[in-house]
Image (tube, rainbow, N blue to C red):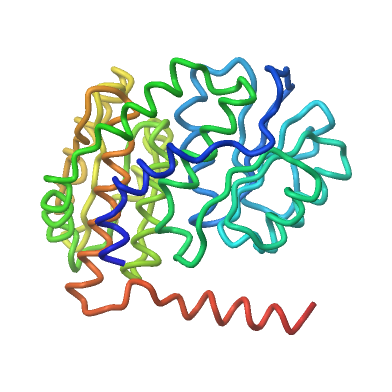
Amino acid sequence: MRQLVQGLGVQMMEALQVPVGHAPSGKMSYRGAIVLGMGGSGIGGAVLADMLRPSLSMPLMAVSDQALPGWVDSDCLVVAVSYSGNTEETLAALSEAENRGCTLAAVTSGGELGMRAENQNWPLVKMPGGNPPRSQFGRSFLGLCALLHAYGILSNASWETIQQAARGLDGSSVEERGESLALALEGKKIYLYGDSPMRGLLTRWRQQLNENSKLLANVEVFPEMNHNELVGWESGDETCVAVLVRTPDDHPRTQLRMDITAKVFQDQGADVIEVEPDGETSWARLLDAVWLGDWMSLILAERAEIDPVDIRFIDYLKQTLSRQI
């Protein structure tokens, strides 16, 4: 896992060279777009949907479920993302999308999803297989971006900025920053916060803490947390650490809310860590923050002498489910 985390920058460079197979001819108009995916495969869709929500003129929704929303129909694009190509929930939702006549596309390393995409000539971005899905964020995220750009949903300007951000990632400091963050979180109950567009990024951090570090963590965003979770901090204490991811893109009122809320956390005895990702653009800061979270989770695992690759509880679940089909 250390080698995979260390190689995220190179992985992104390689991903930018992968073409969209059976690319759509010309731009098309859709009523909405859905990105299907679970866990480490699906998080790229959640990140992208959160980042693009303020600027898109149509809904883009990440669905981590085996069922589609009722409004999805033949006027919608559905992109299935599954690293293995065999994710049960993603394939079930994909079959439903196919039955409804949706336009379909895929990002995968193979499996049943790859076979269906190739047999039916769906637009497809292929990834090399054989790694933990969560370690392939660069390939799945940039592959998804390439597909949505090919369909005209991701603008030329946004796609160019994302590519520049990937090419400009600086790995020289991110490991050191990840270690510092890990040390601040070690032994604490972890609460992750940011502005609303950061929900996908914070969820990625939580997933990495869950799978790599075998830790539980809570995620909530501003301003929603000020209307409920903030009250729950009456039970917060010195065993807690609140991490606030802050960027220049945060809403001005959210910036003020964060300042006030951080004081509440501190008054309860909790540590407050403010993280400001590096980068000149929102996309550069996003990708830097993804890499930072990967290092944080890896170093926490190493310090606890935990195997970050092991996912035996998930393996147990899948094996048990497979016997009950």
Position of 155 with respect to 92 (left or right) is left
x and y percentages locating residue 14 in the rendered image: 39, 44
x and y percentages locating residue 32 in the rendered image: 70, 26
Q: How many marks?
A: 0
Position of 226 with respect to 292 (left or right) is right
The quadrant where residue 98 appears:
top right
Which of the image's four quarters has the N terminus?
Answer: bottom left
Which of the image's four quarters has the C terminus?
Answer: bottom right
x and y percentages locating residue 291 in the rendered image: 28, 47
Is 97 located above or below residue 187 in the figure?
above
x and y percentages locating residue 242 in the rendered image: 23, 49
Q: Residue at x 66, y 83 (%)?
A: 320
Residues 27 and 48: in front is 27
Q: Residue at x 60, y 49 (%)?
A: 81
The quadrant where residue 79 appears:
top right
Is 53 located above or below residue 98 in the figure?
above
Position of 129 with respect to 227 (left or right) is right
Residues 116 and 216: in front is 116
Residues 21 and 51: in front is 21
Position of 101 with respect to 134 (left or right) is right
